Structure formats: C-alpha cells, structure tokens
Amino acid sequence: MKLIDWYIFKAISKMTLVVLFVFAALSGFVDFISQSDDIGIGEYGVYEAIQYTLLKLPSSIFQLLPIIVLIGSLIGLGNLSKNNEITVILSSGFSFFRLSLSTFFAGLILCFLTISLGEYLSPPMERLADQLRTKNKYNLESIGESKGFWVKEENKIININFVSENKSFGELTIFELGLEGQIDKISRASSAGIDDYNQWILSNLSESIFNSSGIESTYSRYKIDKTKLDRDLVSLSVVKSEDLNIIELFRYIEYLESNTLDAELYKASFHSRLASLFVIPIMCLFALPLSFGFQRSRGTGYRVTLGMIIGLAYFIMQNTLMESVQIYSINPILLGWSPLILLTFITLMTFKLTRT
C-alpha cells in the first residue's frame, strides 16, 4: 500500500470524524428535546432522559453514517482538490482509476468501523435504552421471558406470545388475581392491539371467571378494555430489526418462517443492512468526481449543503422503501438493495461525465 493511499484516507477520515461529532451533538440534542414531554412521568427525570439519549446515540449515528461519510469525503477531497494536491498526485503518474481505488480503499476502512458500530455496539444499547425508559416511566416490571413476553400490571399478569413491528399481538392472555393472590379470571384473545387511547382491542376473546359457584365462561368476537400499557411499553416486547445484529436478524427470520409468521419486513431490513455495508465506500467514490472541474473552487459550505441534499435523498428513499413493504407486496430483496443500486448507477454516470 502506497503512502498516497494513506494520505487520501487521512484526508477523508479526518473530515468525516469532524462531521460525525457535529452530527452526534445535533442528534443528541434533538433526541433529548424530544424527551421533554416524558420527563416527570413516573420515575423518568432529566438524568434518565440524558441516559436514554446517550444510549440511543450509536443507533442514530449509524443511520446517519452515509450522509456523514459523504459530507466528510466531499470536504476532505474538496480541500485536496482546491489546494491542487489531487492535480499534483495525478501529474506524478497516479491515474484517475488508481486514485479512485485509493478513495474506495478509504471507504472500506470506514466500512469496517461502521460494522463495529452498527452490528455490535448499537443493537444492545438500543435495547437497553428502550427498556430503561419504559420501566422508569410506568413502573411496570417484566417477570419472565418464557413463552413470549410477560408483564405485571396492578392485579393483572399479562402474557404476550408474539408482537410484530407494527405492535399488533399474535396471542394474548390476561390473568386477573384476587386479594389473596388467587386467579379470579383468565382472558385469552387470538389477536390484540393497543389504540391511541390506551385501550386493548381484543379479538376472539374467551373469558373464564372463577367464583364460588364454579367456572363461568364467555366468548366475544370483539372487546375494548382499559389498560395502563401503551405503545412504549409494548416496544419492550417487540423484536425490532435495529435491536438485532445481522446474524441475529437472519436467525429471527428463520424462526418466523418456521412458525409461518410474517417475516417480509425483517427480510427487507436484513437485505438493507447487507447493502448498507457497501454504501460507505460508494459514498466516498461519489464524492471524488464532485471535487473536480468547476466544483473545485467551491467552498466548504457548498460541499456540506451538497452532501446534505444527496445524503438526505438517499436516506428518505431508503426509509420510504422500507415502509412500503408493509403496504405493497414487493420483493424484500429488491427493496433492500434498490437504494444502493441506484446510488452506484449515479456514481458511475458521474464518473463518466467527469472523465469526458
């Protein structure tokens, strides 16, 4: 590996690190402000809000990394071009293709750092943040993990067998306890959900009431009941794709399919995660041709703005496609890889226009 390769990597990584710190500060501030309505609920105070913000930060940064790397590359390579350093490199016998390889190599190194953040650091911290926030807000304790998710609410013990990412329940059982701890009532619903008014929406509900005269059984196709649980608490039992690393996500998809459960959203997320490993070096390459020609004299502000526009367009497209899997029957592999394929095509076209 030549010294110039490390020189290109240093220029890109240095500015990427600066942009990362700026985005981390802004993201942390926005996340903390978004918690202001929850501060004062239960035991959730300012300290808990700060704790939640810090724990969520790796996940937020991971999602914004393509934008961060693009802006950092635009500034880093732009500074080299503006100072005629790239011109000197090309004049010394370094071809444009070889310069592109050096830029791609810089992106690969940043990609390995991204894997460390997104696959090993972010998921456990994301889970811990959601758990601590919900438990502090509602003082509701989890009482086990065998066969689904268990939670205690006053005199009720609730078992949620399965929760999808849209927070609908596959099967739910509620045990109501008497004053002496005996079971007074058992309610079982084949499917359930919680609406905006913190009410259970229970379907195909069978209820067994235990009293001195025996067992009284009733059945309802549809019933609404009050609960202290809300969607934040339900998120504790939701297996979210961002809470899993890529290996855990693959195994969870296998589990869903083996139990004939819907796995399309998780499949799309899995392929999107795979594609995201290649986004970083492509973003670095994309910045290279934008640092030549008439773009060379542009200032840092222009490069930051350009990076924000392109990066946000990619981010919005990726998230829009991920949400569409719940609405349209589109192949999850196509959804996961489409943004990267489009970005690669635009990058190649930009290279072609630059060379001509």
Image: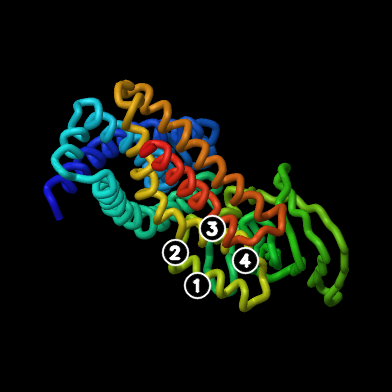
Sequence-wise, the earlier of marks 3 and 4 is 4
Residue 338: x and y in percent read: 55, 53
Q: Nearer the viewer, residue 84 or 121?
A: 84
Packing grade of label 3 (10 A; few <14, some 14-19, many >=20) is many
Mark pair 3, 2: CA separation: 9 Å
Sequence-wise, the earlier of marks 3 and 2 is 2
Q: Residue at x 42, y 56 (%)?
A: 123
Q: Residue at x 59, y 58 (%)?
A: 334
- The residue tagged with tag 3: helix, strand or loop? helix
Residue linked to disc 1: 251
Mark pair 1, 4: CA separation: 11 Å
Q: Label for residue 246? A: 2
Q: Label for residue 263? A: 4
Is 21 left, or right, of 118 in this rendering?
Answer: left
Residue 116: x and y in percent read: 32, 57
Q: Label for residue 56? A: none
Packing grade of label 4 (10 A; few <14, some 14-19, many >=20) is some
Amino acid type assigned to the residue bearing label 4 in the image: Ala
Amino acid type assigned to the residue bearing label 2 in the image: Ile
Sequence-wise, the earlier of marks 2 and 4 is 2
Q: Residue at x 70, y 70 (%)?
A: 183
**Residue at the front extreme, as displayed:** 356
Packing grade of label 2 (10 A; few <14, some 14-19, many >=20) is many
Sequence-wise, the earlier of marks 3 and 1 is 1
Q: Nearer the viewer, residue 256 or 193?
A: 256
Residue linked to disc 3: 269
